[in-house]
Amino acid sequence: MSLRHALLGLLAQGPASGYDLTRTFDGSLGRYAWQAGHSRIYPELNKMADAGLVVVDETGPRGRKTYALTDDGRTELRRWMLHWPEQTTVRDETVLRMFLVQSLEPDDARRLLEGIAEHCARELQRLRPLMDELDAEHDPHEPVPFGRLAGEYGVRQYEAVHGWALWSLERLAATVPS
Amino acid sequence: MSLRHALLGLLAQGPASGYDLTRTFDGSLGRYAWQAGHSRIYPELNKMADAGLVVVDETGPRGRKTYALTDDGRTELRRWMLHWPEQTTVRDETVLRMFLVQSLEPDDARRLLEGIAEHCARELQRLRPLMDELDAEHDPHEPVPFGRLAGEYGVRQYEAVHGWALWSLERLAATVPS
DNA sequence: CGTCAACCTGTCACGATGGACATGTCAACC
DNA sequence: GGTTGACATGTCCATCGTGACAGGTTGACG
């Protein structure tokens, strides 16, 4: 049921159409947190409207329908955000590959880890300037811009993986031949 | 199709039964990387046997069937590990919540972030001694024990999230009232 | 000898998901 | 006036995943 809550969370930022929401999922949200295509989003929005969590806020050209949160929707979002279940759903292909690095021949493992480290370095070079730009533009009287916290999370994530890959390379190389 | 590759990766460590594999998914693999229950694992193993990626290695008491990788299976695992698609599957409820922190009222967001920081600190207290113990027991002539790299990944992950949560709290508190 | 817990494999129904299919609108540019 | 690309919403189906249902075996302990 997390798609529902993802949509509630995005609509909490302000009204949006199914199309808008789909594009948001195409960005870093879908890349790091939760994926969804429009074929799931439109039916889910309709079900949420039936359940009274959202309403059609306004209709625009091309059949555009903008949805807005209801009070029930906001309550449900808050309930979900503050109540963490013991076990949450995780399904991350990248982390899975990291778990399985040791199933490769040492040479392959080394190449893979080097590739990961490089990839992280590249992403960091792309992300850090974006964050700096956001901060430079940011008026300290305004609330923190949406996405800034998530962006920082991404940066720290890549730094962690980068460090891990380098550490793993060292660790694999350090085996003393007997 | 990642379940298939997860199973291939685990079988690369040595033959195992569906039951063994199910228990592995109950541990940190399922917690951080990829979840799967026995009701998916058994049918998938049968399909993989049909496809020639694994074979029944030996049968034991209680109908136990131990599977082993074939050469085809090893080739497919290697192909998958070394070939990273542009877009990988991600579905992580915890990260989703982090993306949506800013949809909460400031007070709720603060409480949530404090909870996350605490949770990370607790997990780190649990994980770090485990890793130290692994290292202390480890004979440097032996290859790095399976799971050590993944464990290190977990530690660095929690450290990153912990740091992020504290940074976010500061950032949210730093808004200058106008 | 009985029973209990852990071992071990499976199926089924229902819901979630992704990719293909389907349809139409509007603005810009040639 | 025509074409193209972005906007916009939807359905359908095959596959994936989950939790419940189901059934049988073995070893240990009393």
Image (spheres, coloured by chain):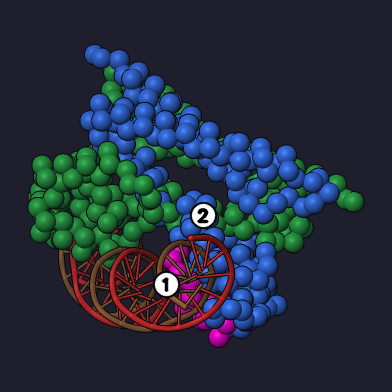
Chain colours: A green, B blue, C brown, D red
- Residue A134 vs residue B71: left or right? left
Q: Based on the picture, tell me whether residue B48 belongs to the magenta stretch.
A: yes
- Chain ID of residue with mark 1: B
The residue at the point 47 percent across, 52 percent down is B31
Q: Is residue A1 visible?
A: yes
Please say if A144 is above or below A112. Answer: above
Comes first in the chain, label 2 or label 1: 2
The residue at the point 20 percent across, 52 percent down is A17
Looking at numbered disc 2 in the image, what kind of residue is underneath it? Gly
The residue at the point 11 percent across, 45 percent down is A72
Residue that extends furthest to the bottom in the rendered view of this protein: B50
Residue A173 location (% of width, % of height): 79, 47
Residue A30 location (% of width, % of height): 39, 52
Looking at numbered disc 1 in the image, what kind of residue is underneath it? Ser
**Main SS class of the magenta portion in the image:** helix
- Determine whether the residue tagged by mark 2 lies in a helix, strand or loop: loop
Quarter residue C13 falls in: bottom left
Residue A160 location (% of width, % of height): 57, 38
Per the rendering, the mark at residue B58 is: none
Residue A108 location (% of width, % of height): 73, 59
Q: Which residues are magenta?
A: B36-50
- Determine whether the residue tagged by mark 1 lies in a helix, strand or loop: helix
Q: Which residue is mark 2?
A: B27
Quarter residue B85 falls in: bottom right
Q: Based on the picture, tell me whether residue B105 belongs to the magenta stretch.
A: no
Q: Label 2 to label 1, Cα distance in Å? A: 17 Å
The residue at the point 43 percent across, 26 percent down is B166
Please say if A29 is above or below B51. Answer: above
Q: Which residue is mark 1?
A: B39
Query: Is residue A49 or residue B121 the one in the foreground?
Result: B121
Q: Is residue A118 visible?
A: no
Q: Are marks 2 and 1 in contact (CB under 8 Å)?
A: no
